[in-house]
Amino acid sequence: MINLKTPITEEDILKVKAGDVVLLSGTGVTSRDMAHKYMVETLIEGKEPLSPEDQRIYEELKKTLKDGFVYHSGPIVRQQDNQWKFISSGPTTSIRTEIYQHKVIKAFGVRVVIGKGGMGSLTLDACKKYRAIYLHGIGGAGVLNAEAVVDIIDVFKKEEFGLPEAIWKIHLENFTGIVTMDAYGNSIHEMISEEVKKNFEKLLLSGGNNI
């Protein structure tokens, strides 16, 4: 079990490898498809000058994500006494953000991406180049994951995107995940895919006699 706490350094990232179990603590944001699209197309690559609100969010994300984390999650939230609380916050399928994730890692200095199902070569290459890892969260345990969210610090774009797709700035304590993509170019997802492909080819060659 390896403890990582924001701000996470390059040295911290190089100490972990695919297959390690991590307890993550510190500050980062939730971000799904819509938020990643916004971060890249508006904040990073937008052609027009940013609006005052977008500029504020950009500056906040620069501070928060530098040596921090992005969590692919669309939480179920509740507001009580003017305070937000995560009721459930399981990881969502990460591959939908593949076209954006590498750009977010580069632009904001993200060290940890949390999600489910793994990501592709663009993200893997960015993890290797910019010293980041992909942390596979525990699927089907949204309530348990939500317990690791000890503080909701802020929320951005909730009116425009809706609560699940909003960018929630959160503080985690001992969030458990498995490193499945590391900064050395190793991907457990890629290894499994190759193994499945080889086994399938063997079945085809045998005419299905090995089933």
Image (tube, helix red, strand yellow):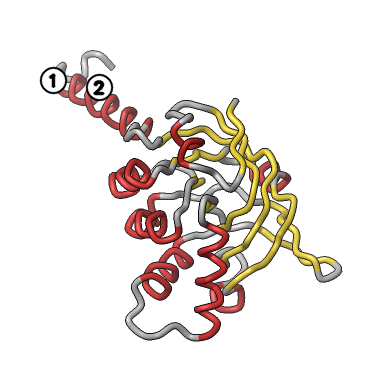
Residue behind mark 1: 205
Using residue 165 as the reference point, say whether residue 196 is left or right of it. left
Q: Nearer the viewer, residue 148 or 110?
A: 110
Whether residue 165 is situated above or below residue 126 in the rendered picture: below
Depth check, front residue: 3 or 141:
3
Residue at coordinates 64% horizontally, 40% vertically from top-left?
175
- Quadrant assignment, res 195: top left
Distance of label 1 from label 2 (alpha carbons): 10 Å
Residue on which the image places disc 2: 199
Q: Residue at x 48, y 33 (%)?
A: 179
Q: On the rendered image, what quadrant is the C terminus found in? A: top left
- Residue 115: x and y, percent? 50, 46
Other-residue count near label 1 (Cα within 10 Å), few / some / many at <14 / 14–19 / ≥20: few
Q: Residue 62: x and y, percent?
A: 51, 64
- Secondary structure under tag 1 reads helix
- Say what amino acid the circle numbered 2 marks: Asn
* Amino acid type indicated by mark 1: Leu
